[in-house]
């Protein structure tokens, strides 16, 4: 994997209501790795985008609308991300972070050529964001040990079958090494 000079970290849906749900890999590990990445990107002066979700697309699905009530802090980002004033906070209403938001405009204004993705869930928020990023012409990097899903088989399918068609995969320690050496 190659790290572009103008890369941005995009952390998907590490918010209280989502990390509280059962995940295939421990959410605490995903949060810790994403937090390390955010610190390293900030230290290099690279953009950090923290995304949460507060809605859903209006279309009908076989699954139907959520059958639960959401607590008031459901959309709050986890404190471990240590939100800083220079971070770009983005609330999305869809699975992906590009549709119906200002993310593309924000990244283009900063000359970003590559998005580095982490978060929950691999097959929904991360993959949807990656598909749009790829279609928009960004280089896409997946930090595969800094993401998880509710189902391990679904997570593996995205990592092994879908992601290689959309970008490059890397592990947290390797990208931290790249950031330190750059």
Image: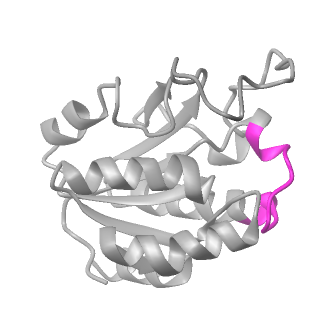
User: Left or right of 160: which side holds 20?
Assistant: right
Residue sitting at 20 percent across and 57 percent down? 138
**From the viewer's perspective, is 107 left or right of 78?**
left
- The picture places residue 170, in percent across and down from the top left corner, at 45, 80
Outermost residue toward the front in this view: 62
Q: Any magenta on residue 23?
A: yes
Q: Residue at x 45, y 29 (%)?
A: 90
Q: Position of residue 33 (x, y in %)?
A: 63, 66
Asked whether 157 or 70 is in front, the reply is: 157
- Going by the image, does 40 lie left or right of 147? left
Please name whichever residue, 108 or 137, is drawn nearer the observer in this view of the structure. 137
Q: Is residue 144 visible?
A: no
Residue 20 falls inside the magenta stretch = yes
x then y, percent, for residue 116 = 38, 61
Would residue 154 be visible to someone looking at this image? yes
Chain part drawn in magenta: 18-29
Identify the image quadrant of the C terminus: bottom left
């Amino acid at each position: 994997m190659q790290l572009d000079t103008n890369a941005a970290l995009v952390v998907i849906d590490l918010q209280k209501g989502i990390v509280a749900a059962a995940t295939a890999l421990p959410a605490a590990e995903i949060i810790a790795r994403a937090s390390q990445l955010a610190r390293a990107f900030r230290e290099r002066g690279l953009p950090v985008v923290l995304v949460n979700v507060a809605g859903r697309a209006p279309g009908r699905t076989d699954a139907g609308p959520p059958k639960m009530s959401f607590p008031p802090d459901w959309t709050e980002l986890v404190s471990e991300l240590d939100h800083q004033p220079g971070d770009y906070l983005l609330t999305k209403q869809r699975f992906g972070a590009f549709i119906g938001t200002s993310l593309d405009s924000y990244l283009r204004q900063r000359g970003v050529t590559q998005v580095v993705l982490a978060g929950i869930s691999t097959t929904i928020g991360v993959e949807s964001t990656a598909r749009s990023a790829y279609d928009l012409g960004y280089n896409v990097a997946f930090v595969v040990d800094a993401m998880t899903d509710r189902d391990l088989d679904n997570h593996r399918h995205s990592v092994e079958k879908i992601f290689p068609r959309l970008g490059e995969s890397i592990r947290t320690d390797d990208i931290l090494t790249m950031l330190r050496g750059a």
